[in-house]
Amino acid sequence: MSKRGAPMLTWLAPALALAATACEAPVKAPAANRTEEKVEGRFPAADRPVATIVSARWSTEEARDRVKEGATVMDKAGIKPGMTVADIGAGEGYYTIRLAARVGEDGRVLAEDIVPEVRDGLAQRVARERLDNVSVRLGLPEDPRLPENSFDRILMVHMYHEIAEPYEFLWRMRPSLRPGGEVIVVDANRATENHGTPPALLECEFAAVGYKLVRREEMPSAGGYVAAFRAEGDRPKPETIRACRIDRADGPAMPQPRATGDMPD
């Protein structure tokens, strides 16, 4: 992508600087920094297994392009030129590179990963391909560290089942959505320990933090399904969030009681 003479958003840095420093692009701290936000209540733990991070690559880019995975997901997500998009768990950058082309020179992409070496490798790729509308940053396992009111779409592709603290992660991510913004999740319909997320469990965990499922459809070319969520109502207090549990991949997910007094008779 060619360079532009117009100034970039304050939370983006030139790609060549990324290669020179091999570290995260400078990001202007939002008015209320999500990473530094003090939380009085405690978040519930995930009441299901958490998959381990095994690789920065889900499949080869050539194989994914043969089935038009990237283009199809972006179409279903409604990603258009000029949008600002976050790629969470970006890995080697399969979606980052394609998002940069889709949103164009008037759009912006923030690629996030929690593994420093993976982040650095992606920063070098972004610099090598001269993607001046892309910023790369390091997140935390429980916090993607996204600036507030910044994103039209947040992509989470083949990584949700690897989030160790899903309720805190989703809670901290929520303020980064713009009005009408959506979180797009692509995952396999299988148990989390087998690197997937049953759709009912996904919907329940998102709902626990105040997100509403707006659409979901099967997508075999991406290894499972694609689901879209929007924030709805007020963000709940951490101590009021109830963890979800699912006993079978095809069964319903239900919020679990918070205390013994909440147990049914």
Image (spheres, helix red, strand yellow):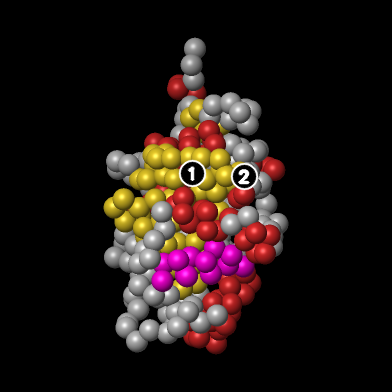
Q: Which circle's residue, 2 or 1, is located before the other in the chain?
A: 2
Mark 2 or 1, which is nearer the eye?
2
- Residue 193 seen in the current view: yes
Which of the two residues, 89 or 115, is positioned nearer the viewer here?
Answer: 89
Task: From the top left corner, tell me how far across and down residue 74 is, in percent.
Answer: 48, 56
The three-letter amino acid code for the residue at tag 1 is Ala
Which of the two residues, 239 or 229, is positioned nearer the viewer here?
Answer: 229
Task: From the top left corner, tell me how far across and down residue 246 is, in percent.
Answer: 58, 30
The disc placed on residue 227 is 1
The three-letter amino acid code for the residue at tag 2 is Pro
On screen, residue 142 above or below 19: above
The disc placed on residue 220 is 2
Quadrant of the rendered image containing residue 31: bottom left
Task: From the top left corner, tell me how far across and down residue 44 is, in percent.
Answer: 50, 40
Local crowd at mark 2 within 10 Å, few (<14), some, or many (≥20)?
Answer: few
Tell me which residue sits at (43%, 40%) in the image.
Answer: 215
Element carrying mark 1:
strand
On screen, residue 226 above or below 8: above
Of all residues shown, which one is farthest toward the top? 265
Tell me which residue sits at (42%, 84%) in the image.
Answer: 3
- Residue 57 seen in the current view: no
Element carrying mark 2:
helix
Quadrant of the rendered image containing residue 214: top left
Tell me which residue sits at (43%, 75%) in the image.
Answer: 133
Marks 2/1: CA distance? 13 Å
Answer left or right for 92 relative to 14.
right
- Start-end of magenta stretch: 92-104
Task: From the top left corner, tell me how far across and down residue 256 is, in percent.
Answer: 50, 28
